[in-house]
Amino acid sequence: MDIAQLIENFGFPIAVTIACGYFIFKMYNNMVSENATREERNYKMMEKFSISIEKFSTVLEVYENRLGNIETDVKVIKDIVNK
């Protein structure tokens, strides 16, 4: 529909209102699609972070076990030296 014909049929205020409504509608649809894309990207990133955190947790458990063994060895050495 031509802008001039729209103004002629409905008047300027109604035509501007329709144009603003159309603009808001298009802007809202664009925003929704961008948000969906952004959320999908964030979910993928969170999944990668989750995998990294699980691996890091495993490494920390191994270090905790090693430190426990070292602590036990130090206590044994301390007992031997103090005798």
Image (tube, rainbow, N blue to C red):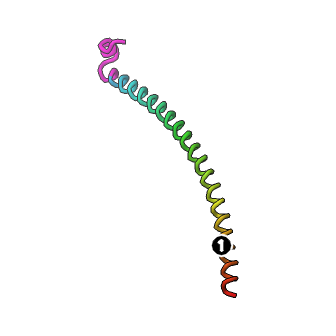
Residue located 66% across and 84% down the image: 81
Who is closer to the viewer here, 9 or 25?
A: 25
Who is closer to the viewer here, 72 or 77?
A: 77
Residue located 70% across and 88% down the image: 83
Instruction: Examine the image and state in which quarter residue 75 appears.
Output: bottom right
Amino acid on which disc 1 is placed: Glu
Give above or below for 39 relative to 55. above
Residue 19 in percent (x, y) is at: 36, 23
Q: Main secondary structure of the magenta part?
A: helix
Spot the residue most to the bottom.
83
Residue 9 drawn in magenta: yes
Residue 54 in percent (x, y) is at: 62, 51
Residue 23 drawn in magenta: no
Residue 45 in percent (x, y) is at: 54, 42
The segment highlighted magenta reads: 1-15
Instruction: Examine the image and state in which quarter residue 7 appears.
Output: top left
Give above or below for 51 relative to 74. above
Give above or below for 46 relative to 17. below
Residue located 46% across and 33% down the image: 34
Give above or below for 69 relative to 18. below
Residue 49 in percent (x, y) is at: 56, 47
- The residue where tag 1 is placed is 71
Who is closer to the viewer here, 32 or 24?
A: 32
Counting every numbered tag in the picture gives: 1
Instruction: Examine the image and state in which quarter residue 16 appears.
Output: top left
Who is closer to the viewer here, 29 or 36?
A: 36
Q: Secondary structure at mark 1?
A: helix
Residue located 49% across and 37% down the image: 38
**Quarter of the figure with the N terminus:** top left
In the displayed structure, does residue 45 sit left or right of residue 3? right
